[in-house]
Image (cartoon, rainbow, N blue to C red):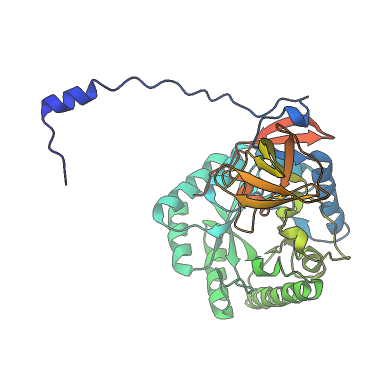
Amino acid sequence: MAIDWTAAEQGSVLKEFRPRRTVPTDWIPAQPGDLLKEIDTPALILDLDKCEANAALLMAAVAGSSVRVRPHAKTHKCAELARQQVEAGAVGVCCAKLGEAEVMLAGNVNDVLITTQIVGEGKMRRLARVARAYAPARLGVCVDNIDVARQLAAICVAEEVTVDAYIEVDVGQNRAGLTDSAAIIELAGLLHGSPAFNFRGLQAYAGLAQHRRGVPERRAAAEAAAARVARARDAVLGAGLPCDVVTGGGTGTLPSDIASGVYTEVQPGSYLFMDVDYTKNEPDGQGPAFQVALFVLASVMSLQDGRATLDAGLKAFSTDLGPAQPAFEGWRVRNVSDEHTVLMRSDDGASIKLGDKALLVPSHCDPTVNLHEWMVATRKGRVEAVWPIDARGKIY
């Protein structure tokens, strides 16, 4: 029921209001030179030695092949790390959303592919204007519907901009993409013939294959995906249309993707950080052995009879694939709540003191990163740099 306030009542309420105070915005969890124990918590910690080793392993894996690397920036959402990936040899990066892509372009990453569809007039206009603002940097989009492609083409022509375009092929993810060869050829013809687009080729991501635990089943899923996209590529080429790029794959299927002879680009993201879920995959002896490089640092804020309560919970790490796990032996997670993780000690667990700092391994690195403003880059237990997570919250 609506409240019918008189003018006098409204005036009396308004008199109670006070001017807003300025909220400090200069908080940062650490400074270069700090020791791990001096970092404010909860904090997102990157082990630079392990991260750099993972990056080098990826580039070594494609060395000598014709396969390029376009890592997925949705994992780290950090322009500094994206620039480092490009400097190490990547052709550019992938982004999940337009907001992420805009941040990467603004951060001088000059070749960006958005791997999800852009729909709706408002978002299409925004895409066109972002592309125009950062030209001559390359901005790519994926499409799987001819009517959407026509609408986007009209908007790009009106905005006097050209974007790279890829057809998304459904290779078993059952989430987006085309499977019918006739529909793929029709869409390829439109994209190739429109002045709004630079038709590059095909996008194919087999997400469900990435976490098949056994190597044989993971390889089989990757090979099935590669066969599907190969059929789509052959259909496009058979129609006399170009298909210069086949981009896709991921961290879990990397060896198979590189060896397939189908992909011209691979899109691993989690390889840089790894997490609890990826480490459950049986190692593939033909591929690089990536290490866990990302952690959440928490403080012991309560300690009672073999129970240690940490100051990091649901708001500090994602639990969609389970809670973050201690990066040390002898303690297990009992429960997680909004602001806390409770650990229980086993008989052989090392002693913990009130105020101690504990490293936790996230179960799922991508959504964990999105919860933090800063990434604290450390080397051998000392802070080397603190980087903003520039695309944090860019889910639109």
Spot the residue most to the front: 305
**Which of 252 and 59 lies nearest the eye of the viewer?**
252
Q: Is residue 295 above or below residue 155?
A: above
The residue shown at (58%, 41%) is 103
Q: Quadrant of residue 351?
A: top right
Q: Is residue 205 above or below residue 69?
A: below
Name the side, left or right, on which 266 lies relative to 151.
right
Q: Position of residue 312 (x, y in %)?
A: 62, 41
Is residue 70 in sight in this rendering?
no
Q: Position of residue 157 (x, y in %)?
A: 46, 53
**Which of 25 and 116 lies nearest the eye of the viewer?**
25
The residue shown at (34%, 19%) is 19
Q: Position of residue 218 (x, y in %)?
A: 76, 72
Q: Is residue 375 above or below residue 286?
A: above
**Which of 358 and 294 lies nearest the eye of the viewer?**
358
Is residue 265 in sight in this rendering?
yes
**Which of 263 and 28 lies nearest the eye of the viewer?**
28
Name the side, left or right, on which 337 lies relative to 92.
left
Q: Position of residue 212 (x, y in %)?
A: 72, 70
The residue shown at (76%, 75%) is 217
